[in-house]
Image (cartoon, rainbow, N blue to C red):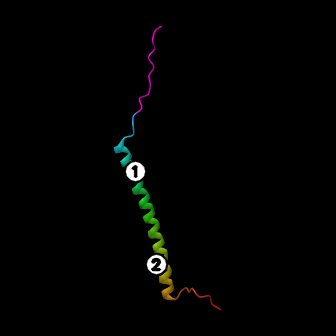
Amino acid sequence: MAGHKIAHATLKGPSVVKEICIGTVLGLIAGGMWKMHHWNEQRKVKAFYDLLEKGEISVVVEE
């Protein structure tokens, strides 16, 4: 019987440099999104207190 050669996929271990790069990019994206969310919330709070200071809105219910 003739032995047949079967092509097997050679499995390589994880690339450390590639994993570090992917992790860094994902971390920067997530951090940027969190920072943008934080800035939007800050803007809302600042607008609320500016309106409160001008007297245009009130936290007390008018009777």
| Residue at x 36%, y 44% (from the top left corner) | 18
Q: Which quadrant would residue 10 be assigned to in this image?
A: top left
Q: Amino acid at mark 1?
A: Gly
Above or below, comparing residue 47 to residue 34 in the picture: below
Q: Main secondary structure of the magenta part?
A: loop
* Secondary structure under the numbered disc 2 in the rendered image: helix
Q: Position of residue 29 (x, y in %)?
A: 42, 56
Q: Which residues are magenta?
A: 1-11
Position of residue 13 relative to residue 59, above or below, is above
Residue at the left extreme, as displayed:
17
Q: Check if mark 1's residue and mark 2's residue have beta carbons within 8 Å.
A: no
Q: Give the x, y percent position of residue 35.
A: 42, 65
Q: Please, is residue 43 above or below residue 31 in the view? A: below
Task: Quickly name the residue at label 1.
Answer: 23
Q: Nearer the viewer, residue 37 or 23?
A: 23
The residue type indicated by label 2 comes to: Lys
SS at circle 1: helix
Q: Residue at x 39, y 37 (%)?
A: 13
Tag 2 residue = 46
